[in-house]
Amino acid sequence: MEDKKAYSIAISLVILLIIGVVIARITLKLTETFFLICGADVAAIVAVFAFVIIRRKFNSRRELLVKQLDSDGRELRIEYSFLRKVAGVPTRFRLKELEEATDNFGSLVGRGSSACVFKGILSDGAAVAVKRIEGEERGDKEFKSEVAAIASVQHVNLVRLLGYCSVPPSGPRFLVYEYVVNGSLDNWLFPRRKIRDRPSGCLSWDLRCRVALDVAKALSYMHHDCRSCILHLDIKPENILLDENHRALLSDFGLSKLMGKDESRVVTTIRGTRGYLAPEWLLENGISEKSDVYSYGMVLLELIGGRRNIRAVDQHGKNYPDKSKAKKFIYFPRIVSEKLAQEKIMDVVDERLVDEVVAGGEVTEIQVKRLACVALWCIQERPRLRPTMARVVEMLEGRLPVDAPAQTTMPIADLLGNDEDLDHRPRQPAVNLSSDSTYSFTMSVLSGR
């Protein structure tokens, strides 16, 4: 714009100078004064042309330099972006980018107690899951914890964080993950009404064994192979995702906590999901990586049985719709322990794997017994009796023998008053208490805080 303005002024000056020469010729004829004016005008015209030529050369050089710098800068940005991806450094997205990717946050795929997850497509065509942290104080803590934890770890069985977005000072916060096509494990374990656009089904026995090993490897890496021991603190089927090959990816580090290598336990407020919390949470004795081991053991039992560990039924064994007035609870871990002692461990296997032909391998008693023993070791009441996740991996892979688990009191079962026998269980499903549901014994224990 400035160049065009300068050229317009130069042309106007030349025209005015020529007009001046013509007027002087008419009025002064061929006098000495006319020649003086004519010489001055010609000199001015030459000066204007010289200015225009010099300016054009200068501008062309400047434009060439700008293009070169822009090209170099673009290459540097591409290289920097590439190195960030190679190093696993998350990208900072703009809010507008996420709004466009998720169609203004219109594609909801999941909702938790403090976050919503939306499916999105980035400008490069990559499918992503955008997690919006809700709530001010808790959301900010979860945001910082999750970014710090996930950005520092890279493992084939951990969901990959692609980027984040934070709108200051108190705006929404977002985490952008790779999109995992087969959704969460609970959709593949627990019978329920099919939800549109949500992958689900009955996971075969071979795939369940592989999922158990995948999650164990992810936790072993977090506990033992990182600079600081990372506690997940919210292990449950809803936080285990399955990719297109049904390989497990551990996700949702919103409650994760770092623990130094020289620390044996840390003290924190009660967090996590009811039904998967280790007893030390309730006793306020401090938590450690063994708290994750307990939660893993509870998930492993659900993989075996294809049912929630805690279910509510009425006295007649029928579905009881009002959970708050349910007269009886069935505690699956105690049933597994009893059936193992009675050498009837096959009674606890998911009925769909026994009654129906599910592609993916035969369910063998040796495998079921191994997984059940590992799970019962993991849910020991005393943390020191639980194995490390590194040992769990070795036991699942068959590199370590699995001894009969020690007897444990299972205080939660005593609170439930569980005396259910699997031989008399109803064929129709009882009421599964989902991970975010409320049951009376938990609320009574926590109400003292």
Image: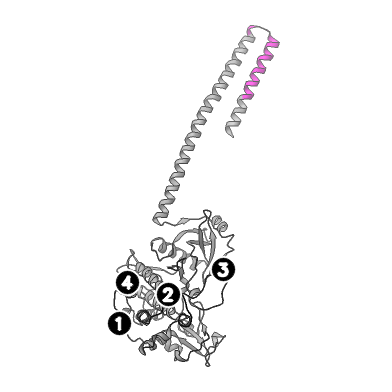
Q: Is there CB contact under 8 Å for labels 2 and 3? A: no
Which of label 1 and label 4 is nearer to you? 1
Relative to 116, is 271 on the left or the right? left
The reply to whether the magenta stretch includes residue 26 is yes
Relative to 38, is 432 on the left or the right? left
Q: Which mark is residue 321?
A: none
Q: Secondary structure at mark 1?
A: loop
Image: magenta residue range: 11-32
Task: Find disc 3 in the rendering and name its residue.
Answer: 197
Task: Find disc 1 in the rendering and name its residue.
Answer: 403
Spatial CA distance of label 2 from label 4 is 19 Å
The residue carrying pointer 4 sits among few (fewer than 14), some (14 to 19) or many (20 or more) residues within 10 Å by Cα, namely some
Task: Find disc 2 in the rendering and name its residue.
Answer: 208
In the foreground, 248 or 153: 248
Spatial CA distance of label 1 from label 4 is 16 Å
Q: Is there CB contact under 8 Å for labels 1 and 2? A: no
Spatial CA distance of label 4 from label 3 is 37 Å
Relative vertical location of residue 105 with respect to residue 279 in this rendering, above or below: above
The residue carrying pointer 3 sits among few (fewer than 14), some (14 to 19) or many (20 or more) residues within 10 Å by Cα, namely few
Tell how many labels. Answer: 4
Type of residue at label 2? Arg
State the residue lying farthest toward the right: 27
Task: Find disc 4 in the rendering and name its residue.
Answer: 390
